[in-house]
């Protein structure tokens, strides 16, 4: 990017600033996933069924899908910090409205709008993080800024259920609003502002999609996230089939810890071995799926498979965001909004495909689908060595 970059941290990472971005990502994912652990309370509070209460998650994801590309594209010329703060403020406003609402329809509107705000946040985080550091630290910066995602994915549902046991579901949304308010102060006081793109720099969205390397990254993203969510969404019935139905929280904790280890390792190595890490992560993802498929009733094998799954998946967002940002150049913010859209489509598709497979062949078939999709992703990544997933150090990238 051609805009001025903060160079005061050329010898290291501006952790305070990057962690503010990580906090925003954490809150965006927590806002999405928390209701899944509160469905009985929400259903009772709004006088609807649990299935209807579950549509709060669907509307949030839909808001992210529909808003990410057009809103991020339309706001490319705006200064970054005010836009980022407006998106976080949107989360604060619509979480507060969710907490206040006693009407199911109004609650869904608030959730859709909150999803739109989250889509903007995710569209901004990668470009923001990269502009805070020199090129040779951009991958590590993305790893730090992205650490909120695996934490929230691992903790969202169980944390929601636990908080719901302490106070009612409305209190949980008020707590999210309070965290958003704290984040706004953090961003205003501790995160630098950058100029938006000039009219000359703003490329049409269709042209960014046609940039070499962008489409292979997005295709690999869709396949990887589709595979992951097919099993992650239905981890409870899978664990029941493996005799671990009473250990779902513990298994999710193991997955989360392994994912954090994965993102830490990826952050250390991504700037030197982006392509190699992507190939190795997908290969380990396939191996973990095979272990889970062959585990039967062996608790040890299941736990080994889950740990390998988390380790291989934790770094995936950093790898894919870095590859996409490198490939798209000055179109990085719009490309990242495409990533948000594809990611959420994959989440939704994973739920549908996993549900169909569960009903057709049972939970034991899910890991085998993961293995097939992991190999399909490898077939996309492997040929993309000239654009998308380039070998060698990326210190001269971007």
Image (cartoon, rainbow, N blue to C red):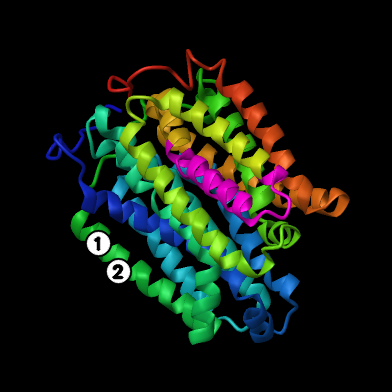
Residue at 43% over, 18% down? 390
Dot 1 lies on which element?
helix
Q: Position of residue 35 (x, y in %)?
A: 59, 70
- What is the quadrant of the N terminus in the image? top left
Q: Is residue 82 magenta?
A: no
Magenta residues span: 292-318
- Indicate which disc residue 335 carries: none
Dot 2 lies on which element?
helix
Residue at 20% over, 33% down? 4
Left or right: residue 330 versus residue 112 is: left
View extreme (right): residue: 360
Residue at 71% over, 43% down? 294
> From this viewpoint, is residue 373 visible?
yes
Q: Which residue is mark 2?
A: 182
Q: Is residue 314 magenta?
A: yes
Q: Position of residue 181 (x, y in %)?
A: 33, 70
Q: Residues within 10 Å of mark 1 (few under 14, many from 20)?
A: some
| Dominant secondary structure, magenta | helix
- Indicate which disc residue 186 carries: 1
Q: CB under 8 Å between callouts 2 and 1?
A: yes
> From this viewpoint, is residue 113 visible?
no
Q: Position of residue 320 (x, y in %)?
A: 48, 34
- What is the quadrant of the C terminus in the image? top left
Q: Residues within 10 Å of mark 2 (few under 14, many from 20)?
A: few
Closest to the observer, 197 or 10: 10
């Amino acid at each position: 990017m051609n805009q001025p970059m903060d160079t005061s941290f050329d010898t290291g990472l501006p952790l305070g600033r990057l962690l503010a971005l990580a906090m925003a990502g954490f809150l965006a994912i927590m806002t999405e996933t928390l209701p899944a652990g509160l469905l009985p309370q929400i259903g009772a509070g709004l006088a609807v069924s649990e299935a209807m209460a579950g549509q709060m998650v669907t509307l949030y994801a839909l808001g992210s899908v529909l808003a990410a590309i057009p809103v991020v594209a339309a706001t490319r010329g705006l200064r970054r910090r005010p836009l980022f703060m407006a998106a976080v403020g949107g989360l604060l406003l619509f979480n507060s409205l969710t907490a206040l609402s006693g009407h199911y329809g109004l609650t869904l509107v608030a959730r859709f709008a909150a999803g739109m705000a989250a889509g903007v946040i995710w569209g901004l985080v990668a470009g923001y993080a990269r502009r805070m550091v020199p090129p040779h630290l951009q991958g590590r910066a993305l790893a730090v800024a992205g650490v909120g995602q695996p934490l929230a994915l691992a903790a969202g549902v169980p944390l929601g259920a636990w908080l719901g046991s302490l106070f009612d579901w409305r209190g949980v949304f008020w707590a999210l609003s309070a965290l958003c308010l704290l984040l706004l102060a953090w961003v205003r006081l501790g995160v630098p502002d950058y100029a938006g793109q000039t009219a000359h720099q703003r490329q049409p969205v269709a042209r960014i999609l046609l940039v070499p390397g962008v489409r292979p990254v997005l295709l690999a993203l869709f396949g990887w996230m589709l595979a992951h969510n097919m099993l992650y969404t239905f981890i409870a019935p899978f664990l029941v089939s493996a005799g671990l139905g009473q250990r779902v929280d513990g298994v999710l904790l193991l997955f989360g810890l392994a994912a954090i280890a994965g993102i830490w390792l990826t952050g250390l190595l991504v700037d030197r071995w982006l392509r190699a890490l992507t190939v190795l992560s997908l290969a380990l993802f396939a191996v973990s799926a095979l272990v889970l498929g062959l585990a039967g009733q062996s608790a040890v094998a299941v736990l080994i498979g889950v740990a390998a799954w988390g380790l291989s998946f934790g770094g995936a967002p950093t790898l894919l965001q870095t590859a996409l940002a490198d490939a798209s150049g000055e179109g990085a913010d719009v490309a990242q909004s495409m990533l948000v859209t594809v990611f959420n489509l994959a989440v939704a598709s994973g739920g549908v495909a996993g549900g169909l497979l569960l009903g057709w062949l049972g939970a034991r078939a899910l890991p085998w689908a993961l293995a097939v999709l992991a190999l399909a992703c490898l077939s996309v990544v492997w040929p993309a060595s000239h654009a998308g997933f380039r070998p060698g150090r990326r210190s001269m990238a971007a």
